[in-house]
Amino acid sequence: MEYISGVKVRRLRLIPDDRGWLMEILRSDWEEYETFGQVYVTTCYPGVVKAWHYHKSQTDHFTCVGGMAKVALYDPREDSPTKGMVNEFCIGPLNPTLIKIPRLVYHGFAAIGNDTAVIVNTPTAVYNYESPDEHRVPYDDPSIPYSWQVKMR
């Protein structure tokens, strides 16, 4: 798959032993790392879409650690070589993946199946409660060429 300019994807590795497993999500010696802002968990219930939004000054790093999530990205940036491109990823414990989402790229996610999707995000900036860097449009905004419907293949 060709990625939107600035998007980086890393297949993560589960390290199991007889007690359980460990998975590194983001390391400062990986190329995806920029800087540390904070770490938080966000969830999405089955049948719900959490989209679309972008950030002007932060980069996000998504990993799904519970359930499965469909993560979609859309590049509206005028100066981008991938303007108009959409990327879609199915991530979770069955496909452990880190997605680096650049500034100004719309993104969102939905749970796949019957379980809540649990996303860990490590953005490059802390959340500013007085002036949030959250710029939103509805999940079904007609300017974004993407449908959150399940695709029957």
Image: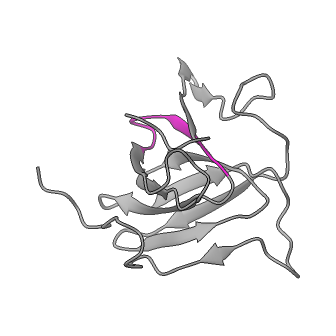
Residue at point 42%, 52% (across, down): 85
Instruction: Give the residue displayed 72% in from the left and 24% down from the top.
Output: 30
Quarter holding residue 112: bottom left
Of residues 89 and 118, the one drawn nearer to the viewer in this rendering = 89
Does the magenta run of residues contain 24? Answer: no
**Residue closest to the eye, 89 or 64:** 89
Say which of 137 and 15 sits in front.
137
**Residue 25 location (% of width, % of height):** 65, 35
| Residue 20 drawn above or below residue 105 | above
Seen in the picture, residue 41 relative to 81 is either above or below; the reply is below
Residue 129 falls in which quadrant of the image? bottom right
Please name the residue shown 63% across and 51% down the image: 120
| Left or right placement of residue 134 versus residue 119 in this view | right
Image x and y of residue 123, in percent: 75, 52
What residue appears at the point 43 percent right and 69 percent down from the top-left corner? 45
Question: Which segment is the magenta one?
Answer: 91-102
Q: Is residue 139 above or below residue 150?
A: below
> Where is residue 17 shown, x and y percent of the image?
55, 17
Q: Residue 73 in the image: x percent, y percent?
A: 48, 55
Any magenta on residue 92? yes
